[in-house]
Amino acid sequence: MNLHGLASPIIAAVNPMIDGTLRASDGYEIGAGRKQVPKYKPDAAARLQVQPLSGKDLAHLEAQNIQGVQRSVYMYGDTQGVVRPLAKGGDLLVFGSQVWLVTVVFETWPDWCKVGVTLQMDASP
């Protein structure tokens, strides 16, 4: 059952879905000075619902020592944070003319996911 599909239209009456872009990680390549440079698959359109973090989500991120400007995002599909066994960095979401790194996956289901994102100050949309 797609609970996000049922709840999203109701929540959208108060907090509308926005258009964004998903930059899915595709590993890395070695750049100048043997430095790892992230690679990304081609950009894909995404419908996002951005919300503040809940108390439980804040506690989760605090336990992982993740700091910065953070939000939670509900979206259709499956996006990932860092997956070390696959040598992938975190996926990026671009919305509101800003770039956000997926730092944690709170929920993942066949049709949708809820992720925690952290604003990237040194990235351009």
Image (tube, rainbow, N blue to C red):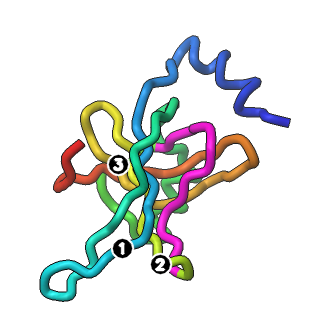
Q: Quadrant of residue 14?
A: top right
Which residue corresponds to mark 3?
100
First in residue order: circle 3 vs circle 2: 2
Q: Is residue 29 above or below residue 19?
A: below
Query: Of helix, strand and loop, which one carries label 3?
Result: strand
Q: Was residue 36 drawn as part of the magenta stretch in this picture?
A: no
**Residue indicated by mark 2:** 87
Give the image location of residue 50, x and y in percent: 47, 34
> Mark 2 is on which residue type?
Ala
Write down the residue under mark 1: 28
* Three-letter code, disc 1: Tyr
Q: Earlier in the sequence, mark 1 or mark 2?
A: 1
State the mark number for residue 88. Answer: none
* Quarter assignment of residue 89: bottom left
Residue 30 placed where, x, y %?
26, 81
Looking at the picture, does residue 122 appear above or below residue 15?
A: below
Secondary-structure class at tag 1: strand
- Residue 10 locus on image (x, y percent): 67, 16
Taking the image as shown, residue 74 lies to the left or right of residue 30, namely right
**Can residue 19 be seen from the camera position used here?**
yes
120 vs 43, nearest the viewer: 43
